[in-house]
Image (tube, rainbow, N blue to C red):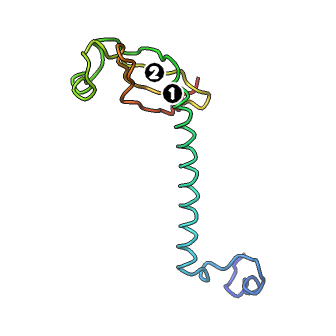
Amino acid sequence: VKHSRDSFKHLRKMPGKPKMPAEVGINEGAQSAKNVANHYKHRRDLNQSHIKSQGEELLKEEGKIIAGPGKVWDIDRVVSQHGGEPLDWVKKVTSQTSDGIEVHYLQNLRTGEKVDIKIIQSSKRK
């Protein structure tokens, strides 16, 4: 079925009905795009807030050592920035939440200091 522009004249006169594409002004289109962007930014911010709070809870755990003393990558940087000796530092990982969130961090075994904290949301969930 072929429609002409006149086939849709009745839509322009009815309140609450969608406008024809040619009738949507540039400002309306820009505002609509801005609303969509704001919606996704808000969702992203909520998700980041959720991930951060989950990560903070996970950091209360002891964590499992995944790189022992002497095995931490970039140990020279860690020692120069945070002090201690190379054998004081280990890399740990927390358990994973049902959302797939886990925390990786370096911990000084002598002081308990936790640095280089990274909250990760994995696509692989346990």
Q: Is residue 54 left or right of residue 69?
A: right
Tell me what residue is drawn at x 25 percent, y 29 percent.
81
Identify the mark nearer the N-term, 1 or 2: 2
Q: Secondary structure at mark 2?
A: strand
- Going by the numbered disc 2, the residue's amino acid type is Val
In the image, is 86 to the left or to the right of 15? left
Instruction: Identify the residue position indicated by label 2 in the image.
Output: 93
**Residue at image coords 56%, 72%:** 31
Q: Which residue is situated farthest in the front direction here?
A: 111
Disc 1 crowd rating (10 Å Cα; few below 14, some 14-19, many 20+) is: many
Location of the C terminus (image quadrant)? top right
Q: Kindly identify which numbered label has been placed on residue 117.
A: none
Between 62 and 4, which is closer to the camera in this rendering?
A: 62
**Percent position (x, y) of residue 86?**
25, 16
**Which residue in the protein does label 1 denote?**
102
- Identify the image quadrant of the N terminus: bottom right
Q: Position of residue 41 (x, y in %)?
A: 53, 55
Query: Which residue does the image show at 52% across and 31% down from the upper left?
Result: 56
On screen, residue 17 above or below 116: below
